[in-house]
Structures are given as C-alpha cells and as structure tokens.
Image: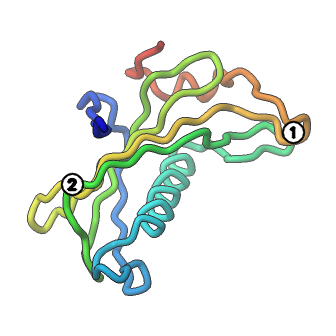
C-alpha cells in the first residue's frame, strides 16, 4: 500500500503557536498518541483562526466545518516536549480549502508531523455548504487556488 506523503509550499505558513505534550497525551507506547495529536492540531487551528479574526461559527449560522484530516508522523514526541505548530492555508476553492500544519520540536529541530485539514464554509442552521466569504479570502493573499 502506498504511504501518504505531505509536502507544502514554504510561502503558505501564516502563523505559529507552541503547545506542550502533557502526560495525559502519552499512550501505551510512551509517546504522543494519535488522538492527542488530533486534539493539538484542532487547538492550533482554533488559535490560528482566532488570530486572523475568524469565528468558527457566526450568529447567522455560517462557519467552518472540517471535512477531512491527513496526518503523517515523522518522529515521536514525549511528555513535556515543547512543540511548535506552524499553520497555513492552501488550495482554496469557492467553498473552502486546506489548513496545513508542520509540527516540530524546536529544541532539537526534529520534524514530528505534517498534517492537512480540509475545510468548507457551512451554514449550521440550513446544513448547507456556502461560498467562502470575501473577508476570509482577502486575509490570505499568497494562497493558491485550485
């Protein structure tokens, strides 16, 4: 079976945030568990959107919904490791795009993981996909379109 490979353009990183691996994030293999990595990616996404003034759900019901997540692991992380989550966007289309993540351990410059989370704009009141708002689109002038 072919392995997933994630490669992202260097000019698409817009934000970074540090997160610490908690003892409760460690699994039976004594390293950061997949479920905890997904939670950390979600936290990094929420911080990124907040930094850019994007609410995940607006009063009118419009918001962002995650459509998929792909993650590749390159090295283990352990309890108390300080990780840096770099966050960007790419592959915009009329309805959404991808939020990308590069996770490193700055202490030894180790690449821990790469991830890509698909998203679309969604109206939670009508349960319908909606077009990307202009004010979101203009925040990311370097992003590519597909």
Q: Residue at x 56, y 23 (%)?
A: 137
Question: Label 1: few (<14), some or many (≥20) within 10 Å?
Answer: few
Q: Are marks 1 and 2 in contact (CB under 8 Å)?
A: no
Q: Is residue 116 above or below residue 84?
A: above
Q: Residue at x 40, y 40 (%)?
A: 100
Which mark is drawn over residue 146? none
Q: Quadrant of residue 6?
A: top left
Q: Helix, strand, or loop for circle 2?
A: loop
Q: Is residue 108 left or right of residue 61?
A: left
Q: Quadrant of residue 82?
A: bottom left
Q: Residue at x 50, y 51 (%)?
A: 45
Which mark is drawn over residue 60? 1
Between marks 1 and 2 in the image, the one whose residue lies nearer the viewer: 2
Q: Helix, strand, or loop for circle 1?
A: loop
Q: Is residue 28 left or right of residue 137?
A: left
Could you tell me residue 11's position as x and y percent? 27, 28
Could you tell me residue 58's position as x and y percent? 78, 44
Q: Residue furthest right?
A: 126
Of pointers 1 and 2, the one earlier in the residue sequence? 1
Q: Quadrant of the N terminus?
A: top left
Q: Is residue 15 left or right of residue 60?
A: left
Q: Quadrant of residue 143?
A: top left
Q: How is the image coloured?
A: rainbow
Q: Residue furthest top?
A: 146
Question: Label 2: few (<14), some or many (≥20) within 10 Å?
Answer: few
Could you tell me residue 35's position as x and y percent? 48, 67
Distance (Cα) linking label 1 and label 2: 41 Å
Q: Is residue 100 above or below residue 22?
A: above
Which residue lies under the disc numbered 2?
A: 74
Q: Residue furthest bottom?
A: 23
Q: Is residue 121 above or below residue 124?
A: above
Could you tell me residue 14's position as x and y percent? 37, 39
């Amino acid at each position: 079976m072919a392995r997933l490979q994630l490669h992202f353009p260097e000019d698409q990183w817009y934000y970074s945030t540090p997160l610490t691996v908690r003892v409760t994030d460690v699994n039976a293999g004594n390293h950061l568990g997949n479920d905890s990595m997904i939670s950390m990616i979600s936290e990094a996404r929420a911080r990124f959107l907040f930094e850019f003034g994007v609410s995940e759900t607006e009063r009118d019901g419009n918001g962002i919904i995650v459509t998929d997540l792909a993650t590749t692991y390159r090295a283990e992380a352990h309890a108390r490791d300080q990780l840096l989550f770099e966050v960007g966007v790419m592959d915009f289309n009329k309805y959404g795009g991808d939020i990308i993540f590069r996770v490193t351990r700055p202490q030894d410059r180790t690449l821990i993981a790469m991830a890509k989370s698909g998203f679309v704009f969604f109206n939670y009141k009508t349960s319908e996909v909606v077009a990307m708002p202009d004010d979101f689109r203009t925040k990311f002038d370097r992003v590519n379109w597909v």
